Amino acid sequence: LFPPVCCLFLSRSTWGVVSACPFHCVCRNLSESLSTLCADKGLLFVPPHVDRRTVELRLADNFITEVGGNDFVNMTGLVDLTLSRNTIHLIRPMAFADLESLRSLHLDGNRLTILGPRDLAGLVNLQHLIVNNNQLIKVSVQAFDDFLLTLEDLDLSYNNLRRVPWESIQNMASLHTLNLDHNLIDHIAEGVFGELYKLARLDMTSNRLRTLPPDPLFTGAISPTPYNAVISLNFGGNPLHCNCELLWLRRLIRGDDMETCATPAHLAGRYFWSIPEEEFTCEPPLITRHTHKLWVLEGQRATLKCRAIGDPEPVVHWVSPDDRIIANSSRTSSFSNGTLDILVTVARDDGAYTCIAINAAGEATATVDLKIIPLPHRGGVGGNAGSNSVNTKNNRNCRMGGRG
Ligand SMILES: *[C@@H]1O[C@H](CO)[C@@H](O)[C@H](O)[C@H]1NC(C)=O
Ligand SMILES: *[C@@H]1O[C@H](CO)[C@@H](O)[C@H](O)[C@H]1NC(C)=O
Ligand SMILES: *[C@@H]1O[C@H](CO)[C@@H](O)[C@H](O)[C@H]1NC(C)=O
Ligand SMILES: *[C@@H]1O[C@H](CO)[C@@H](O)[C@H](O)[C@H]1NC(C)=O
C-alpha cells in the first residue's frame, strides 16, 4: 500500500556522487548543489531519507496529506521546495523552521484551509510564497512575520478568503507581486499600499469589493520608482458600487480592463471606464426618522433612535447635551445604525441630544430631547432632587442643585 520510501539505495549517478536518494526519486549533484526530484511518484508522505544537504526538493504531484515533524529537519541549505498539487490539508506548526535558506515555497493546489501563526515560522529568507488554489478561509496575522521584509511574491489567489491580514501585508517592503484574485475579499484597508514601493502588480480580480480606498499607489501621487514605473492593477469581477467614492479611480487614465459597475441600479452592468465622471455621484444623508422627545424614569434605560439614508450609507454619531461625541462606555452604546442606548440613566443625562449622520457627500442633524424623571432620593443628597416634580424647569434646577 505504501510506497517503499523506507529503502535507500546507492546510486552511481552520472552527474556526480550522490550517496543516498529516496527510492523512485532522482537525485542530481550538479555544480555541487544537490537536487532531489520526487515529482509524480505516488508518494503519500515526504520521504524520510532525503539528503539533508539538498538544495532543491521537488515533491509536486504526489498524494502527501500533511507536512511537518521531521520532514524538513536540518535542511538548512534548501533553497527551493515544491509541494504543489498534493492533498496537503495540514502544515504542522514549525514544519519549515529549519529552512533558513529557503527562497521559494510552492504549496499551490493543495487542501489547506488555514495558515496558522507558526505554520510558516523560520522562513527568514523567503521570497516567493505560492499558496493559490487551496481552500483557505483564514490566514493568521502572524503567519508571515518571519519574512515580511524579504517576500517579493505572494500568491493567495483561488481560495475562500473573506479577509486577508492587511496589517502584515502593508509591511512587506520588498513585495513585487500580490495575487489575491478569486477570493471573497470585501475590504481593502485604507493606506495599506502606502509603503509598498516595489509593488508592480496587484490582482484583485473576482472578489467582493464594492469599493477601493483611494491610495497614492494608484493615483500616481508617489513618483514612479525605478522598480515600478507602471503598476498593473486588476479589479474586474467585483461588485463595484460606482458612487462618488470611486471617482478618484475613474479619473485615472486607464481603460484596458473589463471592470463593470454592479450598483447603483442605473449604472448596473455598465463598463466602468465608459461612465462619465459626473455620474459617479453620492447622496448626502437624510434623516428619515428619529426620536423627538423621550421621557424616562431615572435609572431606566433610554433608547434614542435616529435613522438616516444616503449614498454611501451614513454613519450616525451622537452628541451629548454638553457637546461631546458620545463614545461607547459601560453605560452607553452608540451603534452605527443610529441607535443610542443609555443603559442606566442618571439625572445629568437630561437634555438635548444631537444625532449627526455623516457620509462622503455631507451631513445632517436632528435633535432629540431626553427628559429624565427624577426619583425621590432618600438621604439628603441634592436637597430638592427628592421632589417628585416632572416639571422640566424644576428638573433642571434640581440637577444643578445636585451637582453643587
Ligand atoms: C556533490 O558533489 C561534490 C563534489 O562535486 C561533493 O563535494 C559533495 O559532497 C556532493 N554532494 C552530495 C550531497 O553528494
Ligand atoms: C538534525 O541534526 C541534529 C544535530 O546535528 C541531529 O542530532 C539530528 O539527528 C538531525 N536530525 C535529522 C532528522 O537529520
Ligand atoms: C459601540 O459598540 C458597538 C458594538 O457593541 C459597535 O457596533 C459600535 O460601532 C461602537 N460605537 C462606537 C462609537 O465605537
Ligand atoms: C441597531 O443596532 C442595535 C445593535 O445591533 C440593535 O439592538 C438595534 O435594534 C438596532 N436599531 C435599529 C433601529 O435597527
Image: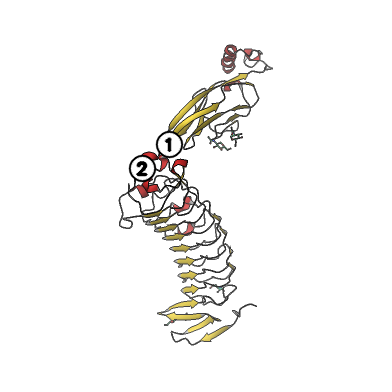
The answer to whether residue 339 of the structure is visible from this angle is: yes
Q: Is residue 360 above or below residue 355?
A: below
Q: Position of residue 198 (x, y in %)?
A: 36, 56
Q: Earlier in the sequence, mark 2 or mark 1?
A: 2
- What is the secondary structure assignment of the residue under circle 2? loop
Is residue 218 rendered to the left or right of residue 381?
Answer: left
Q: CA distance from mark 2 to mark 1?
A: 14 Å
Residue nearer the viewer, 245 or 12? 245
Q: Quarter of the image containing the C terminus?
A: top right
Q: Residue at x 36, y 42 (%)?
A: 276
Q: Is residue 107 above or below residue 389?
A: below
Q: Residue at x 52, y 57 (%)?
A: 143
Residue 282: mark:
1
Give the class, few, some or many, for how many residues have Cα within 10 Å of label 1's Cα (few <14, many ≥20): some
Residue 387, picture quadrant: top right
* Amino acid residing under circle 2: Pro
The answer to whether residue 264 of the structure is visible from this angle is: no
* Amino acid residing under circle 1: Cys
Query: In this figure, what is the number of numbered marks?
Result: 2
Q: Position of residue 149 (x, y in %)?
A: 42, 57
Residue nearer the viewer, 203 or 251? 251
Would you say the residues marked 2 and 1 are in contact, meaning their CB atoms lie under 8 Å apart?
no
Q: Is residue 375 above or below residue 98?
A: above
**Which residue lies most toward the right here?**
378
Q: Is residue 247 above or below residue 1?
A: above
* Residue pointed to by mark 2: 276
Q: Position of residue 132 (x, y in %)?
A: 50, 62
Give the class, few, some or many, for how many residues have Cα within 10 Å of label 2's Cα (few <14, many ≥20): few
- What is the secondary structure assignment of the residue under circle 1? loop
Q: Residue at x 60, y 68 (%)?
A: 65
